[in-house]
Amino acid sequence: MPADPVRDHPALESGVEPHHDWVVKIVSLLPSATEIVFALGIGDQLAGVSFECDYPEAARMLPAVCGTALDVESKRAADIDAEVSALVAMGEPIYRLDNTRIRAIRPDVILAQDLCRVCAVPSGAVQDALDVIGCHAEVVSLDPNRLEDVIDCIGRVGRATGTEPVADDLMSSLRQRLAAGRRRVTGRPRPRVFVLEWPDPPFNAGHWVPDMVEAAGGAPVLASAGQPSRRVSWEEIGSETIDLTVFSPCGFDLDGAVDQADAFLGRPERPGLGRIVAVDANAYFSRPGPRVIDGVELLAELLHPERPGTLPQGAYELSQEPT
């Protein structure tokens, strides 16, 4: 089982207090940022979160200051994509801030993003809302493109919240794990890995995910590190040589990924997808927080298993599933 940087960091295990001289009131509009705040030992300073913030368990108990216009319950991938596309085409927001609740909280720091308007409230929209309600919080936009950027975001949160020493320790620990994983796969054959971020229509997984594949000892297919996820065609996919397809649908845990897999398992291109494994995208791939290093270790176990025939936690074999 991979180490859990949120649950197992020494600052939480030993009861060490964060090294800062003031208490900041924090609102996090990102699940990844919420994980970072808890990993830094200052979860008690979180006053509001996004409706998607579900890890660690304590995050579920915090008031939500952000909701969504989407209704994704029991919907198939194609229907969700159509709903998102319609909202974007109309210029309608996908996410909605609870201005009344944010005004009542009066946060000092708001953690947001500008990387993807489909993933969370854009920082610009947050700043506009603060201007309307008269709140003067510092908006910290976390926008990683590469795997190292994901780790650097921990330092940004540390600086904004006065927890730099804890952040430095956590970043060092994650980098050490990443380096150890790279050493383990050095010189080994590199299977060709296609990470499917959405099944219908198909999207690849971009930004930091190709770096994850490389660090785990694989060769990314139809993806370039640091580039956004993009829509790909089944013709493109079918023309590639693929050893492993990792199904990592953005916004879904492992059960959700398995449930959404029937959107592509019956396609004629399936035999060319190689081994097919569904993963917990929320925990290990889609959210750029500390657990992406767990995701690298999960990928490494799939590609270069220490115990062949076993699956790492957070993965499910789809290769033998009937169409």
Image (cartoon, rainbow, N blue to C red):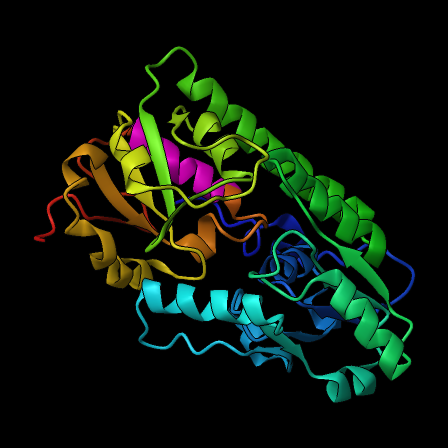
**In the image, 61: left or right of 321?**
right
Seen in the picture, residue 54 relative to 67 is either above or below; the reply is above
In front here: 104 or 172?
Answer: 104
Q: Residue at 32% of width from left, 15% of height from top?
A: 189
Q: Quadrant of residue 67?
A: bottom right
How far across and how far down the image is residue 250, in percent? 44, 56
Q: Main secondary structure of the magenta part?
A: helix
Q: Quadrant of residue 94?
A: bottom right
In front here: 255 or 176?
Answer: 255
Outermost residue to the left? 322
How far across and how far down the image is residue 41, in percent? 70, 59
**In the image, 231: left or right of 21?**
left
Determine if the magenta segment contains residue 301: yes
Determine if the magenta segment contains residue 244: no
Kindly tell me whether residue 161 is visible in this rendering: yes
Which residues are the magenta region? 293-304
Q: Residue at 35% of width from left, 19% of height from top?
A: 190
Q: Residue at 80% of width from left, 45% of height from top?
A: 165
Outermost residue to the top? 187
Q: Which quadrant is the N terminus positioned in?
A: top left
